[in-house]
Image (spheres, grey):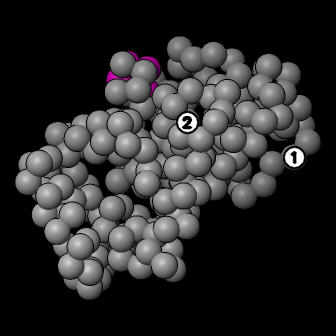
Amino acid sequence: MRLEILNSGYRPGTKLLFTLIRVFSRQAVPDAAKLVFYRPDFYGGRAKEFTHQAMRGSSEWAVADRELMAAFVSKVNECAFCIGAHSATAGQAYHDDAKVRAVLADVDSAPIEEGLRATLRMLGKLTRSGTVDAADMREVLAAGVTPQQIEDALAVCAAFDTTNRLADAFGFELLSPAGFAAGAKYLLKRGYR
């Protein structure tokens, strides 16, 4: 059930921003944007900064890899909005939508590097069960992933486990393929701020 709270209660400057987004993108303002602007002092400001750092901060993972992690965690959580948004963004970042679809269909047979595969498996287990153990970490390290890359991947997972739950709780409306593509273009250009 969609919560209508995302359709009202914004400051005049935010309303103007939303109008400009609609005019220039020719797309509806995504509910994800509405959520972070609804209560910026309580949730939005902190969430934007944490997510931006996880997704665009300094990391040995490419932006495309982190967007794929976001799509993968969202797939495990069955969050349709975030699967669409981050699949589109990862596909644009890689310039390879087929690669993204292959990973989401079957991470074990997808055409990706072993370190990324091991990391995605670990994130999948963490997302499904809420825990990982030393053996899981040893497997990721054995695949050539550094401890810092693991920490960076865990930050992506934390950001999207939270975002997925909010998207589902608020009933985020799915965008059209053109809407997801426009959002992906924005995220790749501007990030999450």
Please indicate whether residue 177 sits to the left or right of residue 127 in the image: left
| Dominant SS type (magenta) | helix
Q: Which quadrant does the N terminus fall into?
A: bottom left
Q: What residue did someone put label 1 on?
A: 133
Please indicate whether residue 97 sits to the left or right of residue 7 in the image: right
Gap in angstroms between the C-alphas marked 2 and 1: 22 Å
* x then y, percent, for residue 183: 28, 45
* Residue segment shown in magenta: 96-100
Q: Which element carries disc 2, helix, strand or loop?
A: helix
Kindly identify the residue that appears in the image at 26 percent across and 58 percent down.
30
- Please give the label number shown on residue 66: 2
Please indicate whether residue 35 sits to the left or right of residue 102 in the image: left
Amino acid under disc 1: Asp
The numbered mark, 2 or 1, whose residue comes first in the sequence reads: 2
Q: Which element carries disc 1, helix, strand or loop?
A: loop
Q: Nearer the viewer, residue 76 or 19?
A: 19
* x then y, percent, for residue 110: 53, 19
Residue 105 in sight: no
Residue 127 in sight: yes
